[in-house]
Amino acid sequence: MNVLVVGRGGREHAICKKVAESPLVETVFCAPGNAGISRDASIVDIDEMNFADIASFAKEQNVGLVIVGPENPLSAGITDYLEQAGLKVFGPKQNAAILEGSKSFSKMMMEKYNIPTARYQSFEDYDAAKAYIEKEGAPIVLKADGLAAGKGVTVAMTMDEALASLDDMMLDKKFGDASARVVVEQFLQGEEYSLMAFVHGENVYPMEAAQDHKRAFDNDEGPNTGGMGAYSPVPHISQAINDQSVEEIIRPIAKGMVAEGRSFTGIIFAGLMLTEEGPKTIEFNARFGDPETQVVLPRLENDLVQVMLDVLDGKDPELTWKDESVLGIVLAAKGYPEAYEKGNELKGLEAIDAGSVIHAGTYSDADVLRANGGRVLLVTGIGSNPAEAQQKAYEKMQHVDTEHFFFRSDIGSRAIAKAGL
């Protein structure tokens, strides 16, 4: 069959790589893709929000499966549109994608279905939000209710930081309509980890855990980003904790969505915190995580396309995983996640094997590779444990020219120390 992957980032590049391995697949298309994805898929110059042209192309090319990567088209109803056009789609419908599209909806669902999470309130009124923050005190967490490309969260350690963030969101409209409503929640302490699952109605098939690094700089300092690196597996999150997370968090949310008439098909991503009271939910996303996908999918032994077809048919895909560790380091444009330059040339990649480089924000200009986003690419290392994977990834990163770019030098270090490696 032919498969169309919708999206343009690192997550979609990782999906295209995995789909291309499938013996079921003749051609992998990616719309709109990026310069690096062109090595693993046929690029289609159609914006991911142009549903009509995506549907026409998919029908013309006899596409047997459409895989939707990013949250924006899912929240805007791409699955509903393509299914109405007679196409098979892996991704939630619009009424289920609200699980990510509205933080306040997500928190309401956790409360209603007894899913462990932080105490919270949501506000559309600035003065009421400010009064609540002053009453609760710092540290405290503020979240833009809507989609903000992973940047709409502030973990405020001081009252000044909390009130400045509230001003940014509600008065200065930093995230536009996404922060017209703000969720303010209790600060949780513990070990953060990510768990994704293939979901179809009440059927849940969990993947292996990963750990993302959200802060821009070493030692978890600086602003929150969409993710500066990740690794999988997570040695200090036991299989028992993973199982508990599935049973107490992911299965109940899948069941709850069915009960609400919003049955979910696709990937549920749970951002979790292992607290002294057990796993708690930080957030749900309605798609593959980024950069977690880039380190989890290489460990999947199954054919990804067969897995998705099985899930859509209500069959257990019987997931199996490689024991090896995968660690990925994000190269970002200087200034990210705030203002940054686009168009700078990427130098040094020719010294790294192409299979280890997953492109996120790149384009080709007369055969010169240039940056086209805040997170530009991710370089992976694979080893028998996180320490070996880290060593291999950083050896590759030394080849990259960082005049206009930066990366963290400590991805995975805390886990390696905890595991005594």
Image: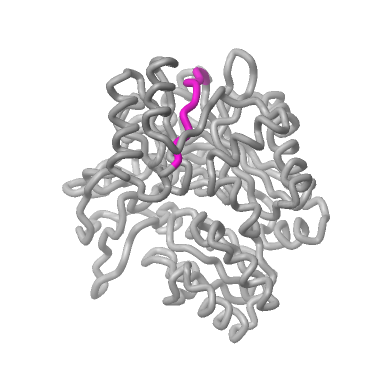
Residue lying at the far left of the rendered structure = 403
| Residue at the image point whose x is 31% and y is 55% from the top | 373
| Residue at the image point whose x is 50% and y is 48% from the top | 294
Q: Is residue 74 among what the camera can see?
A: yes
Q: Quadrant of the N terminus?
A: bottom right
Examine the rendered structure and indicate whether residue 326 appears above or below residue 347: above
Examine the rendered structure and indicate whether residue 284 appears above or below residue 63: above
Number of numbered discs present? 0
Residue lying at the far bottom of the rendered structure = 60
Magenta stretch in the rendered image: 181-190
Quick check: 318 left or right of 141? right
Residue 178 in the image, given as x and y percentages of width and height: 42, 47
Which residue occupies the foreground of this view, 90 or 243? 90
Residue 147 in the image, given as x and y percentages of width and height: 46, 49
Residue 271 in the image, given as x and y percentages of width and height: 55, 35
Examine the rendered structure and indicate whether residue 135 appears above or below residue 254: above
| Residue at the image point whose x is 70% and y is 41% from the top | 206
Residue 19 in the magenta stretch? The answer is no
Which residue occupies the foreground of this view, 206 or 168? 168
Residue 349 in the image, given as x and y percentages of width and height: 30, 56
- The answer to which quarter of the image holds residue 232 is top right
Residue 183 in the magenta stretch? The answer is yes
